[in-house]
């Protein structure tokens, strides 16, 4: 499965790359800015997306909106990662089109399984 992960924190991107590089079924593409993520959303088809919510503009909400407006990717699952994962914030993100919400910090050992579960259920 082809996944796009976008987070402006390079250490988080590196952690995700390390956690997912051993997964044979996950083809990971990463970006460290919303602008770079926009270019990838518009130019390539993915099976799913994982976006950090709180990034400099364009932030995770803008990334989510871009996917939902994309001819290539509008129906693909989007997972939002946020430190603000309380129930009300998660419900708001789901109503905006997110498929699921993962709390930061997340467990890198279970990250691949979480992504698989969300994408397979979508």
Image (cartoon, rainbow, N blue to C red):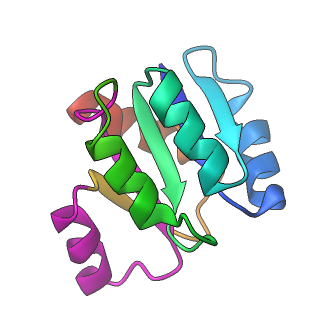
Name the quadrant containing residue 97. Answer: bottom left
Q: Which residue is painted at 45% across and 54% down in the image?
A: 63
- Total residue callouts: 0
Q: Please state the horizontal and vertical placement of residue 58, each as a whole percent of the image.
A: 54, 64
Q: Quadrant of the C terminus?
A: top left
Q: Nearer the viewer, residue 13 or 56?
A: 56
Q: Is residue 108 left or right of residue 100?
A: right
Residue in the picture at 64% in, 72% down = 56
Left or right of residue 100, residue 7 in this image:
right
- Is 92 covered by the magenta stretch? yes
Tell me where residue 87 appears, x and y as whole percent: 26, 81
* Magenta highlight on residue 91: yes
Task: Give the x, y percent position of residue 64.
Answer: 37, 54
Q: Residue at x 16, y 66 (%)?
A: 95
Report the residue at 71% width, 61% height from top: 8
Viewer-side residue, 17 vs 57: 57
Q: Is residue 12 visible?
A: yes
Q: Image check: 102 left or right of 104?
A: left
- Work out whether 87 lies above or below 30: below
Name above or below for residue 102 compared with residue 24: below
Q: Residue furthest left?
A: 95
Q: Which residues are magenta?
A: 73-97
Outermost residue toward the top?
24
| Residue 121 coordinates in the image, percent (x, y) | 22, 34
Taking the image as drawn, is residue 102 in sight? no
């Amino acid at each position: 499965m082809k996944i796009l992960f976008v987070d402006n924190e390079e250490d988080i991107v590196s952690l995700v790359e390390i956690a997912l590089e051993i997964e044979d079924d996950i083809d990971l593409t990463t970006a460290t800015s919303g602008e770079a993520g926009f270019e990838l959303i518009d130019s390539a088809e993915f099976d799913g997306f994982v976006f950090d919510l709180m990034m400099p503009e364009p932030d995770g909400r803008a990334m989510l909106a871009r996917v939902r407006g994309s001819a290539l990717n509008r129906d693909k699952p989007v997972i939002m990662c946020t430190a603000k994962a309380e129930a009300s914030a998660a419900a708001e993100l789901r109503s905006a089109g997110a498929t699921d919400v993962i709390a930061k910090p997340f467990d890198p050992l279970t990250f691949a399984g979480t992504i698989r579960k969300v994408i397979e259920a979508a």
